[in-house]
Amino acid sequence: MSLTARDLLHKLAEDSGINYQSLARMVNRDIQNGQDFLTSVRKIARKKGLNPNNYDLDAKKIADEIDSILRDDYSQTLMISAVLAQMVESKGSNHYPVPAFFVYLEMLYSISEDDFTVKSDPPEDIDTTTSRMIELTTSLVSLICRWNADGIVGVSKSCPSELRDLAKTVYRKTRMLQNGLWTCISCGRIVMVNDTRALMCSECDSQLSDHPLERTYSGDRDRVGYGRTEHDESTE
């Protein structure tokens, strides 16, 4: 079984003979018309004479791998968080979809500090792990949420019961953002989007500005404090 949406589309492209980019556009059009991702993929497979049951994604397995990566190395998770947060703010081709970022944050917040693994050796191949995290979170949000041309419009009927609370939170925060509201990733307060900086409310950003060592993890990577903040402690 494939684990990400991209893996599954590549499999269908290879089996059906449809160009991958053309296939992706077909699926995106179906999603904009209110079909869920797997329904679209299986419809195309059926039209090509393929067994639609051979094309599946397991949202729970995807969530499990995200959780595993997050717990695996605390330093690595900090660095991935920094990169993803910068990509969320990017306006170019490197933009990371906000709903996928909400999935990432909510799963990160759900892990107790004691459950992170702290390794003595510096993390290796951050770029590959970050790319994997992007694929996993974008795949998961495409499965657990219901979409149309306007974006997320609810929770998918096929969302597993264990992930429905996550889907509801992603939907709620996405709707808030559409209405100009943002939840500070440091303190959790709801503020106007125009009053944020580096995805934080002005107060939290000001506090980090007063303590620059808390803002920087290493050389060229900054703004790594994404998670829960407790008084004067650095963020996760």
Image: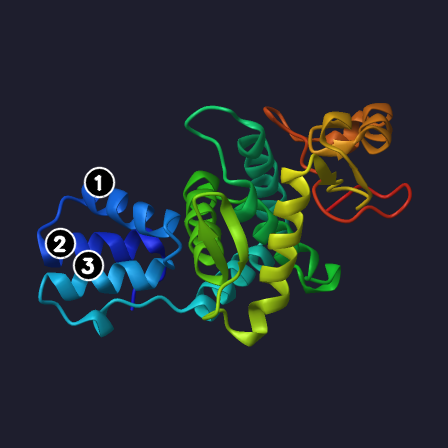
- Give how far apart the Cα atoms at labels 2 and 1 are: 12 Å
Residues marked 2 and 3 touching at CB (< 8 Å): no
Q: Going by the image, does 40 lie left or right of 145?
A: left
Which of disc 1 and disc 3 is earlier in sequence?
1
- Amino acid type of the residue tagged 2 in the rendering: Glu
> Which residue is disc 1 drawn over?
21
Quarter of the N terminus within the rendering:
bottom left
Residues marked 2 and 1 touching at CB (< 8 Å): no
Please tell me which residue is depicted at 26% across the width and 45% down the height of the picture: 24
Q: Residue furthest right?
A: 231
What label does residue 221 carry, if any?
none
What label does residue 14 carry, if any?
2
Tell me if mark 1 has few (under 14), some (14-19) or many (20+) residues whose alpha carbon lies within 10 angstroms of its own: few
- Amino acid type of the residue tagged 1 in the rendering: Gln
Residue 215 image point, x, y percent: 74, 30
> Which residue is disc 3 drawn over?
44
Q: Going by the image, does 95 lie left or right of 79?
A: left
